[in-house]
Every structure is written in structure tokens, then in C-alpha cells.
Image (spheres, helix red, strand yellow):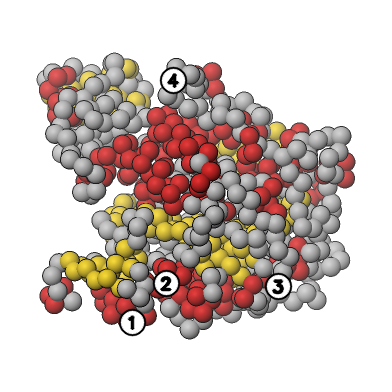
Amino acid sequence: MNQLMPSSILFFAAATHAIVAADGRGFRFLRGHGTSLTVSSSNATRVLDADGGHVQRVTEAWQRAGSPDVYAFMDGVRTALQPFERDYLEGRGEWPGKVDSVSACSYDVARPGFLGGCPQGGCRVFNSLEEAQKACDLNRQSCSGVTKTANALFEVREGSTINSSPSGEISYLRKTCGGEYSKTAQNVYSAFSRAVENGMANSSLFLLKKLGPPRGDDSIFLSIASYRDTSCGPTLRRAFERAKHPEKLFVGIVQMNCERQCMTGTGWGETRQWIPSGPDPDCALEFCTSRLGRPLCDEGHVRMMRLEEKDALGPYFSRFLNSRLYRAETYFMQIDSHTNFRQDWDATMVSQIKRTPNYPRTIISNYPPSGAAEDKSVWSAFDASRQEGSPGLCSAIFEESGGATTARFERTDAEEPKGDALSPPFSCFIAAGFFFGGAQLVDEVPFDPYMPWMFMGEELAFTIRFWTSGFDIHRPAADVVKHEYVRSEHPKFWESVNMIFSDPGMHNDLTACVLPRLHHLLSVSAPGAESTVLASASSNIVDPASVPLGRYSVGSNRSRQAFFTLVGMDFDKHVSEVPEWYKQSKPPPERLRVVNSRFA
């Protein structure tokens, strides 16, 4: 096809209000927010006939006057972070305006230790510090500083973290160059936080708008955050084709895709590599042009927010964006974008939640069994005449993430429950990759937009906020979804973070910067808190632990201490013991879970 047309041709599709661009990468349906629908050249004709611009229009028809303007909100966040992404953007030819010539950079004072890794061109050696710094200035996309070796030579290095050196090496970290921002995790988070605060305070964006109450018709809002996921399309299809009532299902997708000059991950551990790849597929395109999907998409059952790879700020932040696509459905279900579904999954979940004693303020959750969204094999509907049971989450392992402590939950076995096979037993913790609850949670426990780049820790934050707000936690009486774990042949969002900020340690640094907000939520001590830079009137630094939690704090219906007692956890001491009530598949002590008790 490239031989039949110039390198770039523009069409205006009047019927769809979309500009269509054709080039060597295929056809793209351009939109006003800098993203597009990309289709390979081999099937571009088919997609144009099927009206791919129509898909984009109908899946973004949720954007109406008075609805949360998450695109304008993200424009503000993107603008705030752009100065820290300059090296990445320049390399892609996306830096706005004239690119300044390289000017002298400033360097931190000498500190003991060495910088790891070699920048592009290798760890070049110089006799003087000045020569080495000049070379680093000219290679600022991959050079983070200079290390003086034990034999008094100076080497340019890639890493931005100073490691201890038994041989007495010292290092000089590059700070800023002309027109460049000091790219530290604290500065990056501070710029992000101020942009979020400005957006939330802008009443014309309606970001704080109440989106309920639930309309009570057994409809389900399915929240999917998709980071560069080829399984998102199959996940969307399985959700609808295996639902008993697809007419009651509404899906909100926040998609973060790469469209050109893409990289992906392959291998695992020591064999992990970051290699070139093609553009990512649009999650809704195939489904919304299919016989099953087109009428559902045309009727507004799929709501999408299309973002770029550089907008991937972590799953916890993406859940906030997802929540702004909710429109008063009865139930709220959150999954990952690589999920398969059981036949009649929707009816099974509705039947389960209606059997819980605190309905509708109930969350049903666990780590689902393993399975791929692409698997087309039959998974029969649940037979309510027989007990099935499914492990919940009631034990935790404490881990260091970016230099701060967090908790990872584990599937926890218990006695087989007795009685109604559709009655979900009580559980302790919520999984981010699958939970189902009464949609009152959207307005009553609003998702927190101030914890970006966080991977480990979101589940504990969800759990304590929902439970203290009066929501009981249960495990499924029967599994209705499967989840694909590990996914070694896919990119990981932390790899994108490191690439976009041109710093191989940036994700870990950002995690360490943001996790104190989780500790603040839990009211536990944060390691190294005494050295944290606090925000003040004379400082541009925003400390996540010092920002008031406000509406994103724990609830007022139950206390933190009652929660930790209920689930057998002492976060400070890194202790987690499975409660006896869980082992026996019994309800927790009433004195701990009663709403507005003397423990609250």
C-alpha cells in the first residue's frame, strides 16, 4: 500500500467528524486530545469500510456537558510532567517548540559511591572531571553523572542512584541543564500533585461530581484500566458474549497505548529485554465492528478514554479516571484488562451479592484462578446445587517496594462453607484485579487521584477505605473470572516510566516517594520519615505524607484499629495471622464489624 500513496495523506471523514491519516503505519483516526485509532495497513480498507471513526465517536459519546472532563484534566497533568520528559520527547521528535542547543549542566557535590551502568557510547574515561562532565552534557539523554574511580580517572555513567563503593569511589550526579528541570522523584511528584489539585479545584471540569445514586435495575459498570494490553479486546468480548444480560452491562475503559516508535518487554528476570515492537491495538475496535458488539457500542455500552503510553501513571491513578466514566449503574466491578469470564457471570455475581447481610454495601473479591482472555473454551455457568467455594485473601507478606514497606496478599484456604452454595463467605482483603460491589462505593468512597505510579499497595488502600466506610468484604462462593498472571511477553508500566523519564531508577524512586501517603492512610510509621522533605510556604516540594487526605481518608463508620484487629494484621511489626473466623468460614466478630460501633 505504501507504494500506491505518498508517505502521508489526510482525508476528512465528514460523516464521522474524524480526520483520517494514512501513512506507512496504517490509518489513524485523529482526535483533539493527541491520540488516535491505529490499524495496520493490511486491513485498513476493511476498517475504513466498517467506519473505525464511528467506533471512536460512539465509545467517547459519554463526553457531554456537565460530565467529568477527564481529558481536560489529563491535559493539565500531561503539561505539568512534560518538562521532566524532555529527553524522551526530543528523541521521538515530540518536544514542543524550538529545541534549545545543549548548554552547560550543573552537578551535585561529590558524594561517596559509584553510579552504575554505561550510557550510550559506553563508560568513556577522562583524565579530568571537567572533560567527563562536558561529555555527559552532550549525552544527557542517557548520562546521569560522573564517577571518579579508585585510580583517579573519571567515567561517565548512566545510573542515577549512588551505590556504596568499597574501593572509595565518589560520584557527581547531573542536576539540570539549560532549560531542563531537576528530574528528581520529589520534583516530579510535586508537579503532578499541583496539577491534580488545580484540576480537582476547577469546578468547570466536574471531577468531584456525584455520579449516583445507583438506579437499582441490576445494571453493572465494568471498570477496566488497560496499559498497552493486547488482551484488552478479547477481555471486552468475553465480558459481553458470556453475560446472561449483556443489555445491562456497561464497560468503562481507560486505555494507555503506544502508537509509534514502540518498545515492549520479553523474557523474565535476568533474561528480561526491552525491544522494539509494533503499535498497540485499540481495545474496542474489533468488538465494536463485530455483529455482537456494534449495536451495543452504538447504544453506549462501551465508554472509552484513549490516552498515550506516557500517560500511564500506574493502576491506582487509572482507577480514579475509570470511576469518572461511571453513570449510576447498580453494581461496580473492577478487573484487569487480561481477564476471561464464566458463562452467566453477571447473574451469578448479582445472586451472590444479594445474599450478603450488608447488601448493597458489600465487596466480593479474591485473586481469580489463572486463565487467558484469548481462551475460547467453554466455562459452564455455575451450578447452584453444589458447593464450589473459592479461596479469599486473608494473609499478607510484607515487602520493600522502592525503599518503603507495603503488603502483598495471598490466596488463603478455609473450611468448605456450609449452606447456600451462592452465599459468599466473609473475607479480609480486596484484590485490585477483581472486585464486585454495590456502586454506592463510587460516591461514598471516591477513588484517590494522588497516588500515581504505585503498583504495590493499592489493594491495602482499597481494603481499609472500603471497610472503614461500612462495606463488608467477602470472597466469592463461586469464581466467575480468570486472570492472566506474570505476562512476561508484555511491557510493564514501570518499564515505560523509566523510559519516559530517561532514568532506569525513576519508578522505584517515585514509589518510595509516594508510598508514605499509604502509610499516612494507615496511620503507621514510614521508614526514613525523619528525612522526608516537607511541603511549606517557602518550598515547591509536595510531600505525599503531609498532604491532607480529606475525602480520600479512611471512613468514619469503623475504625482503623478495628480493621487491623479483624484481619489479624500489625503493619508496623510486619505481622499477619489468618483469623480463626476466616479459617472456619464463619462471620467475623459482630463487635468489630458493626457499623458506628463504639470502636468507630
The secondary structure type at the circle numbered 2 is helix
> What residue would you read off at disc 4?
539
Q: Earlier in the sequence, mark 1 or mark 3?
A: 1
Residue 586 visible here: yes
Q: Which mark is residue 55?
A: 2
User: What is the spatial separation of the Cα atoms under label 2 and label 1, in whole angstroms?
Assistant: 12 Å
- On the image, the x and y values in percent for residue 565 come to 78, 37
Q: Earlier in the sequence, mark 2 or mark 4?
A: 2
**Foreground disc of the pair 3, 4:** 4
Q: Earlier in the sequence, mark 2 or mark 1?
A: 1
Amino acid, disc 3: Ala
Q: Which mark is residue 49?
A: 1
Amino acid, disc 1: Asp
Amino acid, disc 2: Val
User: What is the spatial separation of the Cα atoms under label 2 and label 4, in whole angstroms?
Assistant: 47 Å
Q: Residue at x 33, y 55 (%)?
A: 34
- On the image, the x and y values in percent for residue 593 come to 82, 44
**Foreground disc of the pair 1, 3:** 1
User: What is the spatial separation of the Cα atoms under label 1 and label 3, in whole angstroms?
Assistant: 36 Å
Q: Quadrant of the C terminus?
A: top right
Q: Earlier in the sequence, mark 1 or mark 4?
A: 1
For label 1, the crowd category at 10 Å Cα-Cα, with few meaning under 14, some 14 to 19 and many 20 or more, is few
Q: Is residue 11 above or below residue 103?
A: below
For the residues labelled 3 and 2, say whether their Cβ atoms are less than 8 Å apart: no
